[in-house]
Image (cartoon, helix red, strand yellow):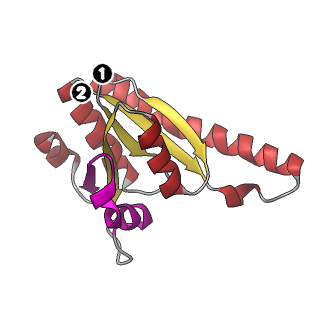
């Protein structure tokens, strides 16, 4: 089964990437894998404190994932899987793609503010010629209705 890999973060554009991935998966018989990467700098504390912070980060990610997962199950009949990795985002995304041969497309949401499309889109598009899968970049301002039409 071909999977659409989507990165779960706190960005606003993440929502459109999730919607697009779920709608495409539903229409093509694919799956959705949601990846969240915990940055290493969050745990540069005492060992015990770092472990508590790591567990709290995982709990926040799972709670955030469940919101998207419920919508995907209820509205798109897609049951997403969650993967949590620790490290720097781009290397962890690339590692996940290399490790899971079912991933067929990386779906990213593009930011709409004056700073540009966002760090993930900027970094990964620079490497797009050597990536093992295509990238779909979903505009952050695209309406839900427009997403439904194009998927």
Front residue of 50 and 92 = 92
Return the x and y of residue 12 as percentages of the image width and height. Answer: 41, 56
Q: Position of residue 37 (x, y in %)?
A: 56, 48
| Magenta-drawn segment | 117-138
Image-quadrant location for residue 125: bottom left
Name the residue carrying label 1.
77
Q: Residue at x 72, y 45 (%)?
A: 54
Tag on residue 26? 2
From the viewer's perspective, is residue 140 above or below residue 32? below
- Please tell me which residue is depicted at 24% across the width and 34% down the height of the picture: 23
In magenta segment, residue 129: yes
Confirm or deny contact between disc 1 and disc 2 (CB under 8 A).
yes
Give the quadrant of the C terminus.
top left
Split into 4 quadrants, where in the image is the N terminus?
top left
Residue situated furthest bottom in the rendering = 114
- Tally of numbered discs: 2
Circle 1 Cα neighbour tier, 10 Å, few/some/many (<14 / 14–19 / ≥20) = some
Would you say residue 141 is visible in this rendering? yes
The Cα–Cα distance between marks 1 and 2, rounded to whole angstroms, is: 7 Å
Q: Position of residue 128 (x, y in %)?
A: 30, 59
């Amino acid at each position: 089964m071909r999977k659409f890999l989507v990165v779960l973060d706190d960005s606003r554009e993440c929502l459109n990437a999730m919607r697009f991935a779920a709608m495409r998966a539903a229409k093509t018989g694919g799956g959705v894998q949601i990846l969240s990467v915990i940055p290493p700098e969050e745990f540069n504390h005492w060992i015990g404190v770092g472990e508590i912070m790591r567990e709290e980060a995982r709990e926040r990610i799972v709670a955030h994932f469940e919101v998207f997962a419920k919508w995907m199950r209820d509205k798109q009949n897609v049951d997403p899987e969650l993967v949590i990795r620790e490290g720097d985002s781009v290397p962890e995304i690339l590692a996940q793609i290399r490790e899971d041969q079912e991933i067929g497309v990386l779906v990213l949401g593009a930011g709409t503010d004056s700073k540009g499309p966002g760090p993930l889109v900027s970094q990964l598009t620079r490497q797009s010629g050597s990536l093992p899968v295509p990238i779909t970049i979903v505009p952050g301002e695209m309406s839900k209705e427009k997403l439904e039409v194009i998927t």
